[in-house]
């Protein structure tokens, strides 16, 4: 499996636009780090708001967003540019939130109401 800095076909077509014109591995790696940092600065507040809306807990929301960010970095090799990085991040966050909410509800005791 190719990574964003080393696509399978050897071309730069799968790289995010800011990285496509870089000639050396060092230039691409530096540009990738800068691109990732820019994405974090740009989208982290929005991801945190979404997570807090669903979880109603700032600490848990921050944890889920951090986990989302780790998953995003791990999945960069599969990012093909068919959607925006923002869409990719939100989809990863949705999966994380689903896991978190399922874990929360499965650990809560079931209440039985008597008549």
Image (cartoon, helix red, strand yellow):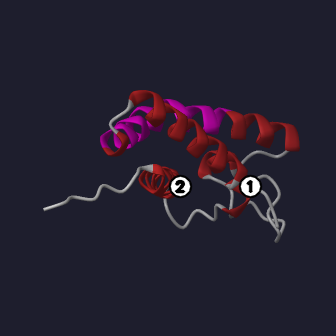
Total number of numbered discs in the rendering = 2
What residue do we see at 82% from left, 71% from top? 9
Q: Residue at x 87, y 44 (%)?
A: 25
Where residue 53 sits: x, y (%)? Answer: 30, 41
- Relative to 85, is 73 on the left or the right? right
| Tag 2 near tag 1, CB within 8 Å | no
**Residue stretch rendered in magenta on the structure:** 34-53
Secondary structure beneath label 1:
loop
Nearest to the observer: residue 67 or residue 17 = 67
Q: Looking at the image, which residue is at 79% across and 63% down? A: 7
In depth, the one of 112 and 22 nearer the eye is 112
| Residue at 66%, 32% in the rendered image | 34
Please indicate whether residue 23 sits to the left or right of residue 38 in the image. Answer: right
* x then y, percent, for residue 59: 46, 28
Q: Secondary structure at mark 2?
A: helix
Report which quarter residue 2 is drawn in.
bottom right
Q: Main secondary structure of the magenta part?
A: helix
Q: Is residue 86 visible?
A: no
- Name the mark on residue 92: 2
Q: Disc 2 and disc 1: Cα gap in Å? A: 18 Å
Closer mark to the observer between disc 2 and disc 1: 2
Residue topped by disc 1: 4
Dividing the picture into quarters, in which one does residue 110 lie? bottom left
97 w.r.t. 1: above or below: above
Packing grade of label 1 (10 A; few <14, some 14-19, many >=20) is many
Location of the C terminus (image quadrant):
bottom left
Q: Is residue 91 left or right of residue 114?
A: right
């Amino acid at each position: 499996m190719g990574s964003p800095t080393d696509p399978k076909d050897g071309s730069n077509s799968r790289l995010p636009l800011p990285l496509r014109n870089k000639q050396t591995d060092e230039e691409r790696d530096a540009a990738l780090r800068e691109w990732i940092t820019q994405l974090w600065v740009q989208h982290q507040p929005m991801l945190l708001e979404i997570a807090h809306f669903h979880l109603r807990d700032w600490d848990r929301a921050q944890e889920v967003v951090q986990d989302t960010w780790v998953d995003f970095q791990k999945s960069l090799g599969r990012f093909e540019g068919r959607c925006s990085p923002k869409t990719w991040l939100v989809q990863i966050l949705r999966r994380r939130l689903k896991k978190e909410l399922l874990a929360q509800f499965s650990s809560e005791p079931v209440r039985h109401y008597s008549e």
